[in-house]
Image (cartoon, rainbow, N blue to C red):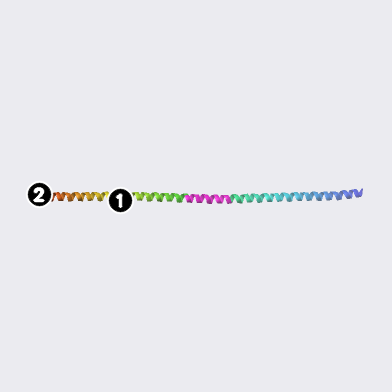
Amino acid sequence: QQDWIKNKREQDKVDKERKRQEEDNKRQQQEKETAQKQQEEAERQRKRQEEDIWKKKEEELRRKAQKEAEAERAERAERQKQDEQRKQQEARQREKEAQQRRAAEQQREAQRKKQREAHAKQR
């Protein structure tokens, strides 16, 4: 009976140690899984942040390109407006010069007519 008690105590110690070992293993496995989940979440977070940064840069570049395109269109419109004004001014100037030539021609014609009439009276 003493052997049985001794064996029982020994078996209880072994069982207790095995149970403790199993719990340690279970705890270590849970810690490992938790660490892995945290690492995976950190990686997902890093990727999201990286993606956000790229999206912001992309949006910034798109806005910049849009502003440049708008500025270019405005510049082109201003040049066209100035060209049109210049052409209109040149056309007005040509018309003014043509009117002056016609007026000068009419004046010369009137003067020649006067001279012819004066010559006719002298005869």
As for residue 60 lying within the magenta part, the answer is: yes
Q: Residue furthest left?
A: 123
Q: Position of residue 81 (x, y in %)?
A: 36, 49
Tell me the chief SS of the magenta region. Answer: helix
Q: Earlier in the sequence, mark 2 or mark 1?
A: 1
Q: Which residue is mark 2?
A: 120
Could you tell me which residue is drawn at 44 percent across and 49 percent down? 70
| Closer-to-camera residue (25/113) | 113
* Label 2 residue SS: helix
Mark 1: secondary structure: helix
Q: Which residues are magenta?
A: 50-65
In the image, taking residue 111 as reference, residue 25 lies left or right, namely: right
Q: Position of residue 117 (x, y in %)?
A: 11, 49
Residue, far right = 1
In this view, the mark in front (2 or 1): 2
Q: Position of residue 76 (x, y in %)?
A: 40, 50
Residue under label 1, please give it. 90
Q: Is residue 66 left or right of residue 88?
A: right
Q: Residues within 10 Å of mark 2 (few under 14, many from 20)?
A: few
User: What residue appears at the point 66 percent right and 51 percent down from the top-left corner?
Assistant: 39
